[in-house]
Amino acid sequence: MSIAAASHCVVRVSRFARAVGAAAALAAAAAASAQDLGMKAPPQTGLTAVVGATVHTVSGPAIENGAVWFVDGVISGVGTADDYAQFLSRVRLSTPPITIDATGRHVYPGLIAPWSQLGLTEIQSVVASNDTSETGDLTPEVRAVSAVNPDSTLIPVTRSNGVLLAAVYPRGGTIAGQVSVIRLDGWTNDDMTVLGSAGLSLRWPNTRPISAWWMDRSDEDQMRDIRQGQKAIKDAFDAAEAYARAKEGDPNHPTDLRWEAMRSVFPGFVAEPVTGSATVNSDPLAKSPAGQRPLFIAANDVDQINAAVTFASERGMRCVLVGGQDAPRCAELLKKHDVPIIVMGTHRMPRRADASYDEPYTLPRVLHDAGLRFTIANNDDTAHERNLPYAAAMAVAHGLPHDEAVKCLTLTAAEILGVADKYGSLDTGKSATIIVTTGSPLEVTTGIEWAFIDGRMIDLSNKHTKLYEKYRERYRQTGDLKQP
């Protein structure tokens, strides 16, 4: 190579290096700027009451001219405005209550996103802001909440549309880790954690070769991978169950974090927290209920569903179906084993070329008519998680009763995720996690006027509202904005 050619090559490499450096700097700047700078809500002090609204308890009938009052983050009473007045006449308060006149408004439990990656991803095109997957195919000890960014700008955007709780799922391998349930406000991961582990995320492999035009592998190669995938799942659960039995018989048995994290999915075994620090980030079972937890099994095809449910039932394990596009074809099996379904969105294409165009829209109604328990996820880019209510609204437009749609985003979601003892409905003794709206939360035109998480009043401003205010000010300064 001539000196001139070598010099030209160096110049080109130098330019490439500068381009890579610039791209990296831009990515870092984007990740750094994607931080919520708002303050977190302080704990509730004294008594707060929302009075005069239509109260939708979800667990019972709506209450006209109703009231919900709460203290220390817990609902003290739900009833009519007269019931609240009588309550005040019977008690002596050290400080005056905070009373919100919500006449003409509606009160609902905070909505729950049953599947999301909130806090795990910020800007999908920026790799540094994505922390959804762990290395390896079998990582049951991984907990989604450990990687949640409490200062994600997507969290305040989501809760400003009424979504106050979310299940966060790890992704990646076949056994991806522990599903966590978080409240959408908190200074730290520990503050946000409702359940460190609501169950184990499992992706069921295909059961038949794919014959689509884009598949460039033979049926034989695909079937070999399918058999290997199914064997890997069986071997992992065999090893975890053997470990659970050994641990039960000998408390001094060496601890394996992978199998320890799977103990509670088996019947009759109680998982124990790992010794050491009790903080949520070091304890894989912290803030999780005692007793058996479910498998959240991702499966859509009828054969996948049959195989997955049969596998779980034969071992006495509970399961939740994530996806379930062919669930109506397996209705009897799902009802027999009381398997609930997380419908992964309604704004998507039909599963098969010969299916009806509205198959995704009508799936919730079909499940409801079949007597199956289900909830609805958004299943869109995480930045659009705020649109969760509209995924349910599409189902309402295609036959699902409105009240059932609201229930599936509140009480049913809470039941499936294992948090219905505190969330999902407006009942005395439950968490004061509520929204005050101008109408049905499923309507695009409805506004969320107040929100409370565990009794704490939430600031509903976010990056979108701040930009709205910023550019209104621009036109106000130029005189182009005629409104005050």
Image (cartoon, helix red, strand yellow):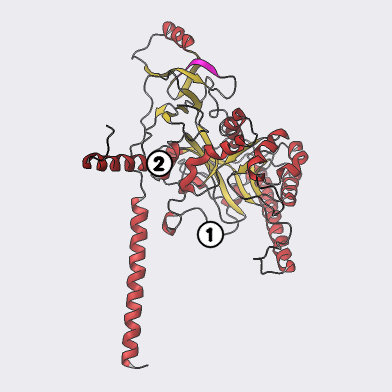
Which of the 4 image quadrants contains residue 313? Answer: top right
473 vs 459, left or right, is: left
Q: Which mark identifies residue 188?
A: 2
Against 267, is 102 above or below?
above
Q: Camera-side residue: 122 or 134?
A: 122
Name which residue lies at 53% across and 38% down: 390
Q: Secondary structure at mark 1?
A: loop
Which of the 4 image quadrants contains residue 157? Answer: top left
Q: Camera-side residue: 292 or 482?
A: 482
Q: Secondary structure at mark 2?
A: loop
Label whose residue precedes the other's in the sequence (1 or 2): 1
Name which residue lies at 68% across and 69% down: 217
Asked if residue 64 lies in the magenta stretch, the reply is yes
Name which residue lies at 50% across and 47% down: 117
Indicate the position of residue 141 as horizontal and vertical percent values: 56, 50
Specify whether residue 76 is in view.
yes
Asked if residue 327 lies in the magenta stretch, the reply is no
Amino acid type of the residue tagged 2 in the rendering: Thr
The span shown in magenta is: 62-69
Amino acid type of the residue tagged 1 in the rendering: Thr
- Please give the residue where the numbered disc 1 appears in the rendered image: 135
3D distance between C-alphas at marks 1 and 2: 24 Å
* Label 1 crowd bin: few (<14), some (14–19), many (20+), radius 10 Å: few
Against 120, is 427 above or below?
above
Q: Camera-side residue: 168 or 461?
A: 461
